[in-house]
Each structure stands twice: as structure tokens, then as C-alpha cells.
Image (cartoon, grey):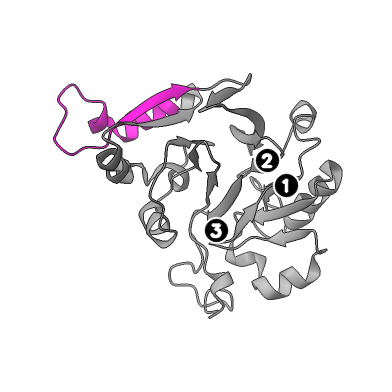
Amino acid sequence: MKITFLGTGTSQGVPVIACDCEVCLSEDPHDKRLRTSLLVESDETTLLIDAGPDFRQQMLRENVMRVDSIILTHEHKDHIAGLDDVRAFNYKSQDAIDIYAEERVLKAIRKEYSYVFAEYQYPGIPRMRLNTISEYGFNINGIPIIPIRVFHYRLAVYGFRIGNFAYITDANYIPEESKEKLFGVKYLVVNALRKEKHISHFSLREAVDLIREISPRRSFITHMSHQMGLHNKVSAELPPDIIMAWDGLSVICK
């Protein structure tokens, strides 16, 4: 299985509009972060976790020719705003694209994209087939996926475990029963907004503490703001098994 970080930034991305901090002015491509999203590819299928406002740009940059299904962690705009652009994949496959999320998130999709689900189907609109997931897991093209309940301040969101890989974004609290689903993973992706504590995201120290508790082979930090600092400086502070992910990074999970 191969994972590709399509975006590793926060809801504002990096650089932030009108900001003149050293990170936003950096010429290092590692400091250019689109909104967080992940591509998961196996022999059986190609999955996307979240489709934010940079969806089109990410698909073109990585030359993605096929997406079978999209899994949504939650309904915030930076995770669903790109769904209109699934039209290109609809046209190529001549089929609707499967969207997997819990019912609350699907309700938000129906509201946000009401024209997709209207009685009158306007020509050329996206085609989405909505699938409700539960805490007990689901299967996409033979691949079992385990939802992991985490909390984004007071909002319940889902992370996901696929085999020996797990992905947690937009979280600052993980219940003990959810942590049990993470034990044994070899590859772990965790969000960390900045070094200072935040109301709805892990800080870098909190993310590192979680990684040490789960003890995967390799870990990756994602969903970073410009307040995290320069990529090269922060990377130098981390142990070699914990990597600050960057847009376009691909990893083979063996």
C-alpha cells in the first residue's frame, strides 16, 4: 500500500493570506502546505481521505487518474469543499463516486451540495453515492477499514486504520478505547497544529507523546500551521522515526 500526502496544512493552508512571517515567506517547498488530504493506493483500489478546497490542484499535481472512493473524517469546510470536482472522475468512470462517512457528515454533504441530490438533476453536476459508516468498520473493494473515534475539541470525528497504517487528523483527544485500535500499527499519521497547546488540535509535544505511547515503526506529522515553524528547523528537533510530512511525500507501507 502506498500513501501520498496531498496536503499537510491547516484550514488556512501555508502560506496564509496576507501573512509576512518567516514560514509564509519561506522559499522552501516543504513550507508550502495545501489543505490536509491523503491518497491511499493498493492493487485493489485507490482511496482518498478528505477532499478539501485544494482537491483539484492536488489531483493535477500528483497526476491522479483514478479515485474509487472518498472517506471523510468530518464535515468542516477544509475537508469537504472540493467534492464538486469529482465530476472529472464521474465522467471518466461513467459512474457515481462512493463517499463514505458517518450519518452526521453525510447530512452536511446533502446540505452543502443540495444541487447534487435535488429532484431535478442539472446536467453536469457531480454524482455521489453516499455510504454510511459505523464504529464497527466497513469494507471497500476487499479492504477492511476500521474507524477510530477521536475528538476535535467537542466535535466527534473519525480517524481510520487500514491494515498496519492509521491516520488521525483534526484531533486533540483520543479515548482509551480508541487507542486500543491503534496498537500494533507500523505507520501512524497524527495531526499537530503548532508547538503551543491548542483548543482543538494536538500540539507537537502531545502528538509525540501519543506516538511514543502507540510505538509505531514510523510516524508522520500533518495538519501543521505556519505557527509550527520552518520545516527544516522543526524536523531537526524530532527523532529520526518521526517525520514532518510535506505535500507530495509518498510512503510505501509494508
> Residue 99: image x %, image y %?
42, 31
Span highlighted in magenta in the image: 106-132
Residue shown at 26% from the left, 26% from the top: 117
Residue type of the residue flagged with mark 2:
Ala
Whether pointer 2 and pointer 1 mark residues with C-beta atoms closer than 8 Å, the reply is yes
User: Does the magenta portion include 114?
Assistant: yes
Q: In which quarter of the image is residue 122?
A: top left
Residue extending farthest to the front is 43
Tell me the mark number nearer the camera, choosing from 2 and 3: 2
Q: Quadrant of residue 42?
A: top right
Residue type of the residue flagged with mark 1:
Tyr
For mark 3, give the secondary structure: loop
- Please state if 103 lies on the left or on the right of 221 as rendered: left
Q: Name the residue under label 3.
A: 9
Crowd band around label 3 with a 10 angstrom C-alpha radius: few (<14), some (14–19), many (20+): many
> Residue 183: image x %, image y %?
80, 35
Q: Is residue 49 above or below residue 203?
A: above
Q: In this view, does 21 lie above or below 74?
A: below
For mark 1, give the secondary structure: strand
The tag earlier along the polypeptide, 2 or 1, is: 2
The tag earlier along the polypeptide, 2 or 3, is: 3
Residue type of the residue flagged with mark 3:
Gly
Residue 201 in view here = yes
Q: Mark 1 points at which residue?
A: 187
Give me the disc on residue 166: 2
How far, Cα to Cα, is label 2 from label 3? 18 Å
**Which sits in the foreground, 133 or 149?**
133
How far, Cα to Cα, is label 2 from label 1? 6 Å
Residue shown at 51% from the left, 78% from the top: 20
**Which sits in the foreground, 205 or 87?**
87
Crowd band around label 2 with a 10 angstrom C-alpha radius: few (<14), some (14–19), many (20+): many
